[in-house]
Amino acid sequence: MVARNLGSRIRRRGLMLVLSSPSGAGKSTIARNLLESDSSLELSVSVTTRPRRGSEIEGVHYHFRTMREFERLRDSDELLEWAEVHGNCYATPREPAELALAQGRDMLFDIDWQ
């Protein structure tokens, strides 16, 4: 009886599912397949300083920022992690990830291996 009552009071936190490998190793393909097979899974949208490519949409593929904006985010602890890859900076924004996980939503992270 106690265990049943306890279980109903415990809120489930979301899971962080991290795909990490060198650039070009297939993370995005795996991520796309996972997202297509599980509609409850959310993708963390990274911040980057690289220029937007023609078909990319702000907030869908990346959050595109200038180096100055990126440095402000980094210096104010608004990023969970960041790295420089091929001369551009990439990062995981803290707030959307922490909010999703606190609300019990599972989130997929596609991160280049360093």
Image (tube, grey):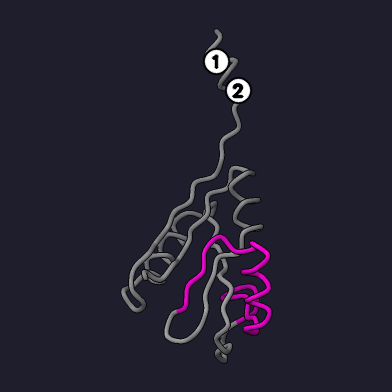
Amino acid at the residue labelled 2: Ser
**What residue span does the magenta drawing correspond to?**
57-84
Along the line of sight, the residue nearer the viewer: 74 or 18: 74
Q: Residue at 59% across / 73% down in the picture?
A: 47
Quadrant in the picture for the C terminus: bottom left
Residue 35 location (% of width, % of height): 47, 61
Question: Furthest residue to the front?
Answer: 75
Q: Are marks 2 and 1 in contact (CB under 8 Å)?
A: yes
Question: Furthest residue to the bottom?
Answer: 54
Is residue 71 located in the magenta-colored stretch of the structure?
Answer: yes
Q: Secondary structure at mark 1?
A: helix
Q: Is residue 48 above or below residue 51?
A: above
Q: Which residue is mark 1?
A: 4
Question: Furthest residue to the top?
Answer: 1
Q: Is residue 82 above or below residue 12?
A: below
Residue 59 location (% of width, % of height): 64, 73
Q: Which residue is mark 2?
A: 8
Q: Is residue 16 above or below residue 31?
A: above
Is residue 25 located in the magenta-colored stretch of the structure?
Answer: no
Q: Residue at 68% across / 65% down in the picture?
A: 76
